[in-house]
């Protein structure tokens, strides 16, 4: 459930980013940037946003688990595959969430994007 909420948050952030950066997209396209380059830019931003959230969540989850285990005088056991799986799932969801905004940004024509300034 948390991954779904995170994915919706990333998608919303990226859609707003595309809307606010239309003049930048138009300028880049008019200077020769291809649709693929625009798509890769927004998809990589989405992945970076997701990666930071996933790493932060994994670190926070590990710290809370270790704190509770210490409080209960239990050994701390957090499998590395669980933390890596969480970050991997976050990256996958972030890529899926950023795909639509990236495609939308790449479809903008330079004249249409620059006309919104």
Image: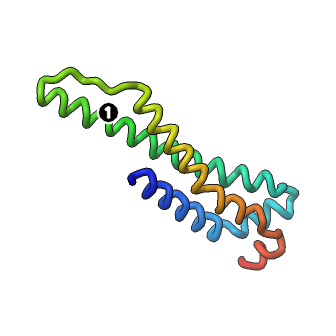
Nearest to the observer: residue 75 or residue 102: 75
Residue at the image position 59 percent from the left and 51 percent from the top: 46
Q: Is residue 12 left or right of residue 103?
A: left
Q: Quadrant of the N terminus?
A: bottom left
Q: Position of residue 115 (x, y in %)?
A: 77, 78
Q: Is residue 83 left or right of residue 100?
A: left
Residue at the image position 21 percent from the left and 21 percent from the top: 75
Q: Is residue 73 left or right of residue 60?
A: left
Q: Position of residue 107 (x, y in %)?
A: 78, 66
Residue at the image position 52 percent from the left and 38 percent from the top: 88
Residue at the image position 41 percent from the left and 32 percent from the top: 83
Callout 1 crowding tier (Cα within 10 Å): few <14, some 14–19, many ≥20: some
| Protein image colouring | rainbow
Q: Position of residue 34 (x, y in %)?
A: 84, 55
Q: Quadrant of the C terminus?
A: bottom right
Q: Is residue 49 above or below residue 113?
A: above
Farthest left residue? 72
Q: Is residue 66 above or below residue 75?
A: below
Q: Number of numbered discs present? A: 1
Look at mark 1 in the image and give the residue it sits on: 62
Describe the element under mark 1 as helix, strand or loop.
helix
| Quadrant housing residue 22 | bottom right
Q: Is residue 43 left or right of residue 77?
A: right
Q: Position of residue 19 (x, y in %)?
A: 64, 70
């Amino acid at each position: 459930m948390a991954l779904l909420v995170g994915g919706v948050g990333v998608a919303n952030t990226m859609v707003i980013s595309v809307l606010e950066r239309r003049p930048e997209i138009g300028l880049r396209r008019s200077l020769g940037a291809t649709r693929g380059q625009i798509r890769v830019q927004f998809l990589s931003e989405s992945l970076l946003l997701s990666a930071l959230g996933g790493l932060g969540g994994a670190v926070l989850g590990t710290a809370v688990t270790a704190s509770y285990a210490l409080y209960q005088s239990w050994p701390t056991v957090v499998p590395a595959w669980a933390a890596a799986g969480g970050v991997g799932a976050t990256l996958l969801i972030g890529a899926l969430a950023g795909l639509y905004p990236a495609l939308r940004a790449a479809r903008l024509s330079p004249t249409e994007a620059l006309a919104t300034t």
